[in-house]
Image: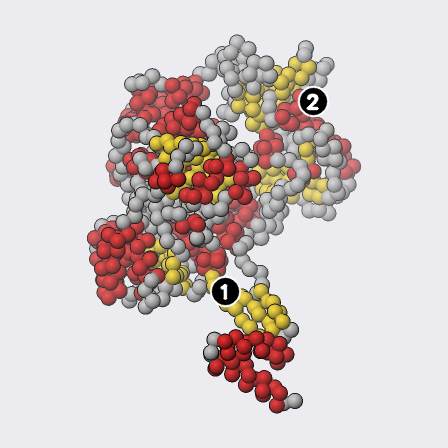
Amino acid sequence: MALPLLAGIDISQQPSTGLSANDLSRLGNVYLDATPENVDDTISYIFSHFRSYSISVNVTTLPDNAQVTSLLDAGAARVFVSHRQLETIQGSVDDTRLVLLLEPDVQNKEKIIDAIANTSVGVYAHQIEDIDFITGWLREYGTGDRPPVFVSFRAPVTIETAVAVGKLAATPIIPQEALTTDPEKNPELLSVAEIFMAGVTSDRPDKLIATVVVDEQGVALGFVYSSVESVKESLRTGTGVYQSRKRGLWYKGATSGAVQELVKIDSDCDQDCLRFFVRQKGAGFCHLETATCFGQYTGLPKLQQILQARKESAPAGSYTARLFSDPALLRAKIMEEAEELCDATEKQDIAFEAADLIYFALAKCIAAGVSLTDVERSLDAKSLKVKRRKGDAKGKWAEKEGLPATPSQPVKAPEPVKIDGRIEMRRFDATTATPKELEDTLRRPAQKNMDIMGIVTPIINEVRTRGDAALIEYAAKFDRAVGLKSAVIKAPYPAELMQLDEETIKAIDISFENIRKFHEGQKEDKPLVVETMPGVKCSRFVRAIERVGCYIPGGTAVLPSTALMLGVPALVAGCKQIVFASPPRPDGTCTPEIVYVAHKVGADAIVLAGGAQAVAALAYGTESVPKVDKILGPGNQFVTAGKMFVSNDTSAGVSIDMPAGPSEVLVVADSDAKPAFVASDLLSQAEHGVDSQVILIAVDLTEEQLKAIEDEVHDQAMKLPRVDIVRGAIAHSVTLQAKTIEEAIRLSNVYAPEHLILQVREASKIVDLVEHAGSIFVGAWTPESVGDYSAGVNHSLPTYGYARQYSGVNLGTYIKHVTSSELTEEGLRNVGAAVMQLAKVEELEAHRRAVEIRLEYADSKK
């Protein structure tokens, strides 16, 4: 497949001109420069975007081949390497993913020919100045069966130069900001369509290009023709636009409604045929209202189409409807069919059982909103990996077949799923309610603090007086960790405690880096220094809190993300001692994800304790637990009560980040909001615990629009493994109906939510109206879960209405400000009279004399 163009991008900035992210994804090919300084960011970028783009990376400045391998594993399609790198890496990586970067001074044909002799890797002519030379060499090199050639330019490139290179079957590399899909609107930029079509040829008298239109899986929908003009319009509008031999430009679906969203465009190996990847809307591609011009879908695409239709409108009581509404049944069928496939021996039986397994596996995918395209992308991602795992069987599956098992976490039994009535939030019309009715409706689930304090206080006293012995006893009592020998794991942590799969490590590493960057950006560059009067200099500067304790909950969900959110800012702030605390697992170990994060942030120890006992250990210290100066982190009511207790005990000498309650979210949605998005955001908080609360403020929605959201809430909830927890949370959650966005935000400010999600038109303009919220998630493409994990903002936020008084955890949570004053003799004379008079008024004679004595001394020296 030919690459007509690589758009060069700089991941550190958003260009003010040039191609958008959507434009780039439709072209599908981008180029990055990796350096020792940005290699981690580059890996993160590739990992996040390889499904949208084919990414080429210049790695010639990287000193370590391990970094090159990491880039390839992250999803880089190809790397541009030096001669030295090629010698060490070739053979371990497919040649099609390697491109040799020629030295900038290579400006003669003989050296180029020598450089690429006896190799099938591509060639990159880098920063070319002599365009005539490179086009002359390309003509000699030929355009037929040869490795790909890439060309970048030292001077700003013109459309003529780019087209000339493209016509010779080479790929020009042009900065993103110099390209456009709308040359009429941006005449100073280079037309992507013209460059794209430069190398495309046609043997037809009318010069039209044969074009195959396919869906996202590559299934052929039909055959059409294209021209430079139609390709320009397709890229400009992001839709399927073709060239009719009779009617000129053909905007597909303009009259029938069967429009096409353009996903990507490319050409074949000979560059005489185009391929358009599209998302087909409406009845289908064909004028006969079939899915394709070759008839209806067959095989897996047909099965996907049927299951998607059944998910939306399966007859009540049908088998497919049962599968979608009963996750336990679907799980059982997948395991049953997998075993039957394993036991099959005859060719016909294997095909039959494989078909059954695929049916049920695809049903699970469709139930979760996963398409065949998503599955194929995951397969493609795995194929790009250079490093391979052994692939041994795990746990009970290996044991059943008599094989050695790879280390794995204990398999947690699924929670029972109860199909017990519709999961639905109650509605409340805020436009007609009295203030008292609104107050009652917005009241959080009650927290029985006095009752809890009666339980917590003896636990704290036990840990304070008996230390480690009490921690071990409480671990056995509350966490079922019988046989725990020590309540603390100290750094350095053994490798066997951090055994994780590569995907989890990569996810933690990406999240770590984003959180680090955001909190690094909060640093104060220099001390504040102000001369308040001549000779009177006041300053303020930052010092890190020396010892911090980070509580990471266990309970119904293990939260390594909280370890990141608490540990990374402590690392950035420069805290000298970081201590984690988290409940042990029944076998007495700590969750390996948390151990890995502790290792990354440099935590000195992990306390294997939860609840109030962990808080007490951090506040007072034990034989093996270091005492800290501040305790941070969310938890249940017992953790919160413990934090409040120790923060009010002056003998503990410890502060806390904030009071906390159960997790909560408030979603504001108008008629632009997608029901599926709204429901998913509500449920992402409801699954935290039965005491979580979710609120929807519906802005002027019709009955039909409200019902669409309610249907999505029920349908999505029924597919969740924690559906019972969701059911409990939804039982005390509410939908408030408001008429205007202003009224909706007023209600939100009254509630002061932990998480506020704005799924409304022009969401960014609404942020200024928000007075009270822990963290705001702006627009349809910003689910709260990105803040929970990987965007960079902190997810440890004030709950239970405390967003009115507290900030979420940030770099400032881990530092304190120290002030200083420095006066000269002149300064003391300037301010001394005011000091002495105020001291006299307050009758603090020693204060007054401290100034007077100095001034008298200064006078005596004259």
Q: How is the image coloured?
A: secondary structure
Relative depth, front residue between 807 and 844: 844
Any mark on residue 229, and which? 2
829 versus 539 height, above or below? below
Taking the view exactly as shown, the residue that stands out farthest to the front is 841
Q: Quadrant of the C terminus?
A: bottom right
**What is the crowding at mark 2: few (fewer than 14 residues within 10 Å), some, or many (at least 20)?**
some
Between disc 1 and disc 2, whose residue precedes?
Answer: 2
Q: Amino acid at mark 1?
A: His
Q: Position of residue 244 (x, y in %)?
A: 66, 14
Any mark on residue 817, and which? 1
Q: Position of residue 465 (x, y in %)?
A: 24, 66
Q: Amino acid at mark 2?
A: Glu
Residue at image position (26%, 31%) is 418
Q: Quadrant of the N terminus?
A: top right
Q: Position of residue 5 (x, y in %)?
A: 65, 33
